[in-house]
Image: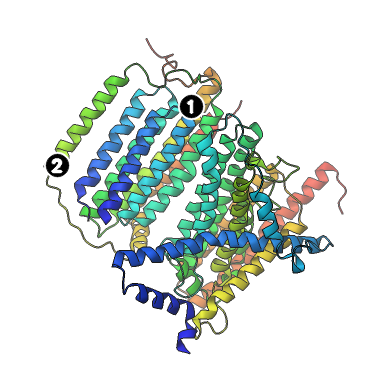
Amino acid sequence: MVPLTWYLLVTAALFCIGLVGALSRRNAIAVLMGIELMLNAINLNLVAFWRYAYAARMDGQVFAVFVITVAAAEAAVGLAIIIAVYRQRRTINVEELDLLKG
Amino acid sequence: MQQVIFIVLSLLTLSAAVMVVASRSLFRSALWLILAFAGIAMLFILLQAEFLAFVHILIYIGAIAILIIFAIMLSRGVMDPNEPRFNDQWRLVIGFGALLFVGLVVIMLRIPWPVNIVAVPADAIQLLGADFVGTYVIPFEVASVLLVAALIGAIVIAREH
Amino acid sequence: MYYIQDLFVNIARSWTSWISGFLPLWAVSGVNYLIMAVILVMMPVLATLTLTWMERKVIGRIQNRIGPNRVGPFGIFQAFADAVKMLVKEDVIPTDADRPVFNLAPILIAAGAALLWAVIPFGRGMAAADLNVGVLYIIAIGSMTMIAMLMAGWSSNNKYALIGAFRAVAQLLSYEVPMVLSIATVALVVGSMRMGAVVEAQVVPFVVVLPATFVVYLMAGIAETGRSPFDLLEAESEIVAGYFVEYSGLKFGWFYIAEYGNLFAISAIVTTLFLGGWRGPGVSAVPALGPFYFIAKIVAVVFLMMWIRGTWPRVRIDQMLGLAWKVLVPVSLANLLWVAFVMKLPLPTALQWVLFVVGGLAVLAVALGLLGRAGRRHVASKGMVQT
């Protein structure tokens, strides 16, 4: 079998790519895509640890299902907010959405 | 053999993730994201979590990716395609990301993980269901309330007035 | 004699033992998977060749005409003539179309129709990959079809294609919910998500035991394949072929193959889940009869779908979405709750199944009664003449 550290390497790389995407893109939807990549990396981490350390019980998969559920809810509400902001301000460039800035 | 499959799948997933961040067109980014989701699902199958893999495909590719594509289509027209897609601090962010990756890898390789590879139980799905209504019933109910709240919230926020 | 009784499985076993003689283990399984993959990919193509002829004949007879009868006896080679015509058409790609996505969309949609066949059991022990989560796999493949439709609509650089893609995805998403709920009901009764287990548990076909589930799944299945009366996605008077309006030649051919492949696959799934799959008289003694019963039942279900197409008018998009969310979801939810409640009662299985039938018919009766009242109220409020 593949050693556990290989899976952890992949999840670390995926998490960092998602982080770079979330922090450096101007479009709000691209930021959301970076966040989804990070959540996917976390899911892969959970399932890898479940398989390699705790496979006799299903707790790892239960956690992963909850992470998927919360990610779905957050994506839905986030995209609704983006659409509402687009209707009001005609832009979804995160640098132009700075009304609260001092 | 399994190692070859793992290397191919992880290269596929990671290159799709890089293309998500670096792609010029937003719609193409969404398609690369779908490929990344599919790669992660195949890694789940490699980890013998088949139920989770198909739930992942169903929710991420079948719902979240479609939501993202709809949002892209409902909010284009004003985004100038010649506008740069990265903000001014992208070099700093990539440096920080690389630093974080190196830090994570160093920490990971030093910890002696308590690896205990046993066979996955044959009635895994029944155990999963029993866990949902047994040990984890409170988070399960809270998750359903969360989904209802997200549903109502998304409809209220995105409504046309 | 005993070889013929389980003919197909024995052929597979003899073939495997012959090639293991001179190939290493990984190559043996690789060759077997390759052969199974080729057979699976041939299923939608086979479906298109035969079902298009059947459809035109059946619809023709329903409409009091003969249907194609020139190309070969009874017109059975009409599909080949259509295929040749499609192959020699010019391959038009619109300007400013997103080329890689444009070319990839028909491939993905045809792949979705082919992948559905991987978990369907043709006979005892004759499924390509009898997954433990077979029914979940079927729903997950449907979502791949939705992505391919969005890709086709977007990359055509055509507003009407985009609107058609939106409508198609809205229809498919809405009807996925009652589909999942009815499949969950069947999985609950069987106690497993494996397709082989669903067939083996049907001592009495589930169309009798779970009538409301069968009706809901049939309607959701017809809507998922985009057939009439839910074919506003591709009807010429609606949006002129919807999301594949800009495709021509072989690329359109793939969409066509995907549509009939989906029809065949959905009929196969209805047969497996509700009509008993490969079960029939004498199958326990002679398992090789299984695929023949299976194909016969699929043809019956396909005939039912074509009958529905030829008889009922098309519904509007708002009527269709209202049907999914306001009628099918409550019916399937009520049925699921009743089935779950009865399964928890400490009764023998036969009595539980009788209670399922009673509950299912009650749910259907209540739903039809409410629909009838709503229909009469609608007619009275609009002042329309009631026939």
Residue A86 at x, y percent in the picture: 52, 22
Q: Residue at x 31, y 54 (%)?
A: B46
Residue C323 point in image, percent of width and height: 66, 49
Which residue shows up at 45% across the image and 29% down it? A29
- Tell me the tag on residue B109: 2
Instruction: Answer few, some or many: residues within 10 Å of disc 1's Cα (few below 14, many 20 plus, some between 14 and 19).
Output: many
Is C223 above or below relative to A79?
below
Q: Amino acid at mark 1?
A: Ile
Question: Which residue is at 66% across, 48% downward?
Answer: C88
The front one of A36 and C190 is A36
Asked if B67 appears above or below C196 in the picture, the reply is: above
Is residue B133 visible in the rendered image? The answer is: no
For residue B21, above or below residue C229? above
**Chain letter behind tag 2:** B
Mark 1 vs mark 2: give the one in front.
2
The residue carrying pointer 2 sits among few (fewer than 14), some (14 to 19) or many (20 or more) residues within 10 Å by Cα, namely few
From the image, which quarter does the C terminus of chain C lie in?
bottom right
Between residue C357 and residue B14, name the one nearer to us.
B14
Q: Secondary structure at mark 2?
A: helix
Q: Point out the residue furthest to the top here.
A: A102
Residue A6 placement, left or right of C153 = left
Q: Which residue is mark 1?
A: A82
Q: Is residue C75 left or right of residue C288?
A: right
Q: Which residue is at a point 51% across and 80% down the rendered structure image? A: C288
Q: CA distance from mark 1 to mark 2?
A: 40 Å
**Closer to the camera in the image, C251 or C153:** C251
Residue A10 in view, yes or no:
yes
- What is the secondary structure assignment of the residue under circle 1? helix
Depth check: A86 or B82 in front? B82
> Looking at the image, is A50 positioned above or below residue C344?
above
